[in-house]
Amino acid sequence: MKQLRTVFKFELFNFYKNKVFVGITLAFVIIIAGILSFPRVTEIFDKKGTENGGVIDNNSSDSKETIALQDNSGANPSDTLKYFETYMQNYKFVLVDKSLDDIKASIEKNDFRKAIIIEAPLKYKYIADYIGMNDYTEYTINEVIQGKYKIDEMARLGIDQSEAVNILTASAQSEVITIGKVQMDNFWFTYIMIFVLYMAIMLYGQMVATSVATEKSTRAMEMLITSAKPINLIFGKVFGSGLAGLTQMTAILGTSVLFYNLNQKYWGDNFVISGMFNIRLDVLAYSLMFFILGYFLYSFIFGALGSLATRTEDVNVSIMPVTMIFVIAFMIVMFSMSSGNIDSMLMKIVSYIPFTSPMAMLARITMGEVPTIGIFISIAILILSTIGIGYLSAKIYQMGVLLYGKTLKISELLKLRKQGM
């Protein structure tokens, strides 16, 4: 136990003394604090601008984008203009009477950036110099023109315009009572947790493998293994790097929670931000458990594979198969989340496989329907697998430390084991 404690402290404080590690942690903390405080800071500057004589009016006509409007359908252009101004208040409309080529020329000269030419009650041309990916102006124009057509037709049939508007704008009142889960409520929390787990395993797992390979290439490992048991060395390294990583994650997530609570009212009803923080405690506890177990499972594997590499340059070759398995697991979970099919047969199967369960079961707990007994079974399998792989990693570490030359494979080690090495 003393040996384990000594290796653990050495690895842990190596991280704490590393300027890059500390710098990355502080950078993330500052960036997250800045992002979550952005609405508050923006409001402060807006208030200062008003106090200094500036007038900020997001609804002023000067700040609105101008759209040229031409009605060739036979309707009164002034009535059409008023209708568009009523239902598209984020834009400023001006009536024009030009040919299509003249309107295009005006757009090219930046007299206005968009134009609508109504040719018939339900037929129009929409001209724009640029249409962005998230530009829904055409969709809005469709709704306005269809609404105007319906109101005009009702008026022609003798229905009063105000009554027609009431009929068209009537909406149903509903109350949603959720017995189970709403997938979208936990989507962003799940996405962030899985992405952080992916980055933590890829980053810290590779650091453990590189550390082991470096000690082997400098032959420092030969001295270490004579003064400490292999199991204490590998467990000390993994636990030390694990606690350092968890400390970094705690600092980042703690900052996120703190600054979200300080600025919660400024985010209003932003469902993305609220979805990441408004999580039940039991869901959070299960998520952290799978996060930690998955982290240690892969760290043991990376540590063992690092001992098979003779040089640090060969580490990537040694860990490539496990990295590919992890990337495939990540893609399966992300695809299932995006499609909403979180409880598919494939996801149920991978929820109980140790290499994939940290992400798959985490996603099913937060977004799907999984019985409590299923969660406990998955946790038990993962705990036993982590312990077993930890001991197996110590054996591989013990054998790999004294073998130099080419990068070894697990199959080659097993053959040497059978030969009595």
Image (cartoon, grey):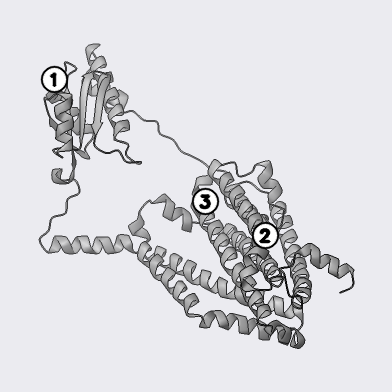
Q: Which comes before the other along the chain, label 3 or label 1?
A: 1
> In the image, what residue type sits under mark 1?
Asn
Classed neighbour count for the residue bearing mark 1: other residues with Cα under 10 Å, few (<14), some (14–19), many (≥20): few
Q: Residue furthest front?
A: 405
Q: Disc 1 designates what residue?
A: 76
Is residue 1 at all visible to an observer of this figure?
Answer: no
Residue at the spot x=40%, y=31% of the render? Answer: 172
Q: Tell me the quarter of the picture where residue 416 sits.
A: bottom right
Foreground tag (2 vs 1): 2
Relative side of 113 to 353, left or right: left
Q: In percent of the image, x 79 and y 74: which residue is there?
A: 399
243 versus 340 height, above or below: below
Q: Name the residue beneath numbered marker 3.
A: 186
Q: Secondary structure at mark 2?
A: helix
The kind of secondary structure element at disc 3 is helix
Q: Residue furthest top?
A: 157
- Judging depth in this view, the residue of 211 and 82 nearest the camera is 211
Q: CA distance from mark 2 to mark 3?
A: 29 Å
* Among the two numbered marks 2 and 3 on one chain, the one whose residue lies closer to the N terminus: 3
Residue 308 in the image, given as x and y percentages of width and height: 72, 70
Q: Of the residues shown, which amino acid type is indicated by label 3?
A: Asn
Figure quadrant of residue 341: top right
Q: Is residue 6 above or below residue 76?
A: below
Question: Comparing marks 2 and 3, which lies closer to the viewer?
Answer: 2
For marks 2 and 1, the one nearer the N-term is: 1
Looking at the rendered image, the quarter that the C terminus falls into is bottom right
Q: Position of residue 162 (x, y in %)?
A: 22, 23
Mark 2 highlights which residue?
A: 322
| Quarter of the rendering occupied by the N terminus | bottom right
Instruction: Report x, y in % for residue 209.
Output: 64, 71
Residue 45: numbered disc: none
Q: Relative to 43, does residue 240 appear above or below in the rendering?
A: below
